[in-house]
Amino acid sequence: MNILIIVGVIVLILLIFIGYYNSLVKLRNQVKNAWSQIDVQLKRRHDLIPNLIETVKGYMTHERETLENITAARSKAVGAESVKDKAQAESQLSAAMGKFNLVVENYPDLKANQNFLALQEELTATENKISFSRQNYNDQVLFFNNKIEIFPSNIVAGMFAFKQADFFEIEDAKEKEVPKVSF
Amino acid sequence: MWELIRANKRKSWILFISMGICLILLGFLIGSYVSEDGGIAGVIIASLIWLFMSLISMSSGSSILLTMSKAKEVTPEVHPQLFNVVEEMKIAANLPAMPKIYIINTPAMNAFATGKGPKKSAVAVTAGLLTKLNRDELQGVMAHEVSHIMNKDVQFMTFAGILLGSIVLISQVFLRGLIYSGGGRRYSSDSKGGGQAQLIIMVVAIVFAILAPIMAQLLYFAISRKREYLADASAARITRYPEGLASALEKLSSSTEDLPTANKVTAPMYIVNPLKAKGKKVANLTSTHPPISERVKILRAMMHGHNASFNDYQKAYKEVRGRSGNIIPGSALKDTESYNIRGAAEGMGAGMGLKAETRATGDIMMAVNHYSFKQCDCGLKFKIPENFNKKEITCPKCGKRIDV
């Protein structure tokens, strides 16, 4: 009888362990999935930029520096590997694009160009998708990291060496570089 | 976000059960009315009617509303911006799949979401809405619709609608039958005691048959109004920009055209009441939507702060309504993360003239119907129907020949 109780308790603990382990794996996969979503959008932006430069080159002869900045930031972003490097490079690229959007206002011809308008819509959408997927990624990271820290799932996380995931933070870097314009 | 869904589920069950009890009670009373021990049979018949209606709706699913409103599924080429905006919201709400996108060919302004769940959903917008809203506003509207999908309002309202439909159907049939047969069952019991009990059941059955549909409807509308507020709150939170939805709602309220294909049961699916022509200013028990002016005020009040979390919506709600009352379940209010409101998108909001708007609406409607567009060098634009069989057209303005 006693043995039965002991076996029952062990089985119960084992089941709870499995449950925690599975939910940790699930959360980790969600983090990975969210990250790959950001990656897709970042790549999309990298692909769009050469097209944009090609389209506007003829119009914006006085903005060589702005365009070169974008190209440089882009190639740096393409080469970045780790989450932190990427976050930094991408925020620089965003800043360069922000400057570009400000100077576009001075070129009414460009703003009437259908091709450019379509590209601009694509770029706006991609920028938005990047920030929304970043929002979602950070949410998932928060869930995962909480689960690793909170008792009792932290025991399971410690046993199987689950590591905390990095947040994708660009807010600070962005604010340092772009002067806030208010109307 | 997830807490909100969980709280919604709990509330949904309470409503389901109370509407279900309504149905079972109705079946039992009518059964007892028809025959002394027909209560159980009545319950079974009522359940079968409900099951049958559920099966019909499940097999045809989202298509009923889409077919009824004559919505057409479109490809990204018809309106790239709409697709982009929906995808943005899909990412923000972390939906597992991209909703299908439909356009309704009408200059009226409205939008709705439908589908069997987050994995298989659809959103529909009218052509009029697409031309009259700028990007931020369109994003607000789509965020509201995607929130309905994310919060599982669509499935919930569909099932509640079926339950309501069954209750209405059963009591209608019973009451009509009563009128035509002139008093229903011949009352022929011998025992006096049994007769008295029978009489009470008869009266209760009739009263309940009259009241049940009204009660079920009021429940349905109350839940619909609450879910509209919730979808607004979720939309503000996922876009971080309450003003987008606020100014979209304002434009929607100024549109006077009704959607002729909507009715009171399908109305909760739309972003604003499609049957609003009467111009109600205050919500009453039979409204499916809260008054637009109030929704706008709440969203605008959020813009005074810097955050767009559920907490901020709740605060703004209290501020505007001037009384306590929780619109967001308490368990979802715990999240203390910051949801900084962003600024308006640059270079947007260039308003078109009325004429240009009408023309743009027409263009979208034609694109939906697979017209192709060609522009002549002189600036004249041709709209060519799909089954046009000539190889070229002559421009009536400059006489040039254009290949089709």
Image (spheres, rainbow, N blue to C red):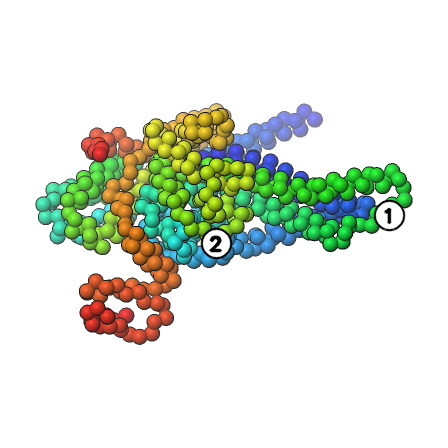
Quadrant of the frame with the N terminus of chain B: top left
Q: Is residue B309 above or below residue B257?
A: above
Image quarter for residue A161?
top left
Q: Chain of mark 1?
A: B
x, y percent for residue B111 = 43, 48
Q: Give the residue at mark 1.
A: B188
Q: Nearer the viewer, residue A175 or B182?
A: B182
x, y percent for residue B89 = 38, 43
Quadrant of the frame with the C terminus of chain B: bottom left
**Dot 1 and dot 2 within a common chain:** yes
Residue at left offset 16%, top offset 42%: A103
Image quarter for residue B95?
top left
Q: Chain of mark 2?
A: B
Badge 1: how crowded within 10 Å, few (<14), some, or many (20+)?
A: few
Look at label 1 and name its amino acid.
Ser
Look at label 2 and name its amino acid.
Pro
Q: Secondary structure at mark 1?
A: loop
Q: Along the polypeptide, which appears first: circle 1 or circle 2?
A: 1
Picture disc at residue B260:
2
Q: How far is disc 1 from disc 2 in space, using C-alphas?
A: 50 Å
